Amino acid sequence: MEELAKKIEEEILNHVREPEIPNREVNLLDFGARGDERTDCSESFKRAIEELSKQGGGRLIVPEGVFLTGPIHLKSNIELHVKGTIKFIPDPERYLPVVLTRFEGIELYNYSPLVYALDCKNVAITGSGVLDGSADNEHWWPWKGKKDFGWKEGLPNQQEDVKKLKEMAERGTPVEERVFGKGHYLRPSFVQFYRCRNVLVEDVKIINSPMWCVHPVLSENVIIRNIEISSTGPNNDGIDPESCKYMLIEKCRFDTGDDSVVIKSGRDADGRRIGVPSEYILVRDNLVISQASHGGLVIGSEMSGGVRNVVARNNVYMNVERALRLKTNSRRGGYMENIFFIDNVAVNVSEEVIRINLRYDNEEGEYLPVVRSVFVKNLKATGGKYALRIEGLENDYVKDILISDTIMEGAKISVLLEFGQLGMENVIMNGSRFEKLYIEGRALLK
């Protein structure tokens, strides 16, 4: 197990490289911007990026101050270096015209992400400053349709649009005809790199996102390092790699309203149509400290293109619902395999320390997912209703789950296994030691 994990890590680290940004700088102030939190700087950002692009790229400096803007569309060979605060205007009309994007794993044309790059190479967001999406219970979040996030009877919400988008994908409606945006209520991601190569996000703080915070899609060679995400709205995942290859997520801090790092690869028919997995992803040395985070490392449920060769090492998860969660169902298809969870700590878990669920949302279909080869080693965890909860299907077992050299204390139930294969070596659960145990089928250990 450890040898294969190290080989995967080496493969990742041998491929990921920081983007090559030309040694050229411009200052946003030179394009008429004012950091007074009143002046609309949208045109300043646009002209600065266009000018840098004409020169072959470089670094756009956003100095101290608070700069209001609409969406920022990056181009190849450009680094957005933030020293102050970029505060995005929370008016949906400003995020038109629509762009190619994904909503919950399905391609469509929708409101632009707040920071967006399409088909770019060598692109970065860096600096000690803040990206503020301005989402709250009056802007963006009410579209979820939950009263906890500002929705009230009579206000619009996303439910009909979500249903319509899913139906279009199942019918095979061409992506060009899946046009939402104005008059619709599907929230955009905050930062999205779509079909990009050589991407870096480093040091910045991201707050108040409409939906998913950092969302690379169909991208390769992505580094996300030392960023802080503080955004506790609905579906405010921290980092969502989707159909990405060769990715490093390290030294980040999360306080999110949903999962912290959650790996995806498209949903149902649309995920199978695109058919691009997320693979070779290393998640290390991160801290999740939140009262709202659903999961530390999560895979799914939009994973129809497959997920493989993921290593999570030396992360700390505090006050999360679950430390490691794999969620899918028989509508998804796809696979999850070679998932390594090593040298991690989980403190004060509220639901399950480890949850693998092939019945997510009780959705059923004809595309049985393959979930196998999940390895957990040297995990130290406290709390939880369950230490391990693994639920496969009678005709679709979860296979080859191995837990070793692990201590889990304080869970109400140690193991619930239904339709799976579980091995434990040198594991302590609630004071009971399992030197070597193999279980297949069903089991309940209290």
Image (spheres, rainbow, N blue to C red):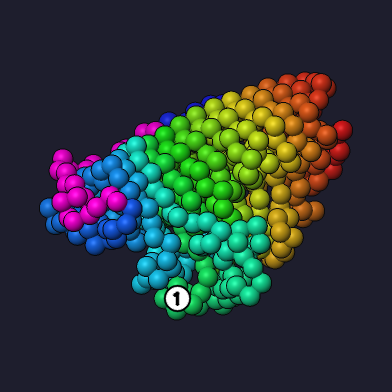
Quadrant (top left, top right, bottom left, bottom right) of the N terminus: top right
Q: Residue at position x 34%, y 61% from top?
A: 70
Q: For this rendering, which residue is in front, 192 or 392?
A: 192
- Examine the rendering and report whether any part of residue 224 can be seen: no
Identify the magenta region: 11-36
Q: Amino acid at mark 1?
A: Lys
Where residue 121 appears, x then y in whole percent?
Answer: 28, 51
Residue 31 magenta-highlighted:
yes
Q: Who's the residue at 19% across and 47% down the image?
A: 27
Say which element carries label 1: loop
Which of the 4 image quadrants contains residue 381? top right
Between 363 and 79, the one lying in front of the other is 79
The residue under label 1 is: 182
Q: Is residue 367 magenta?
A: no
Identified at 68% across, 41% down, the residue is 321
Q: Is residue 112 left or right of residue 446?
A: left
In the image, residue 174 lies at what x, y percent?
46, 76
Residue 333, position as x, y percentages in the image: 62, 59
Height in image: 44 above or below 317?
below
Q: Is residue 442 left or right of residue 356?
A: right
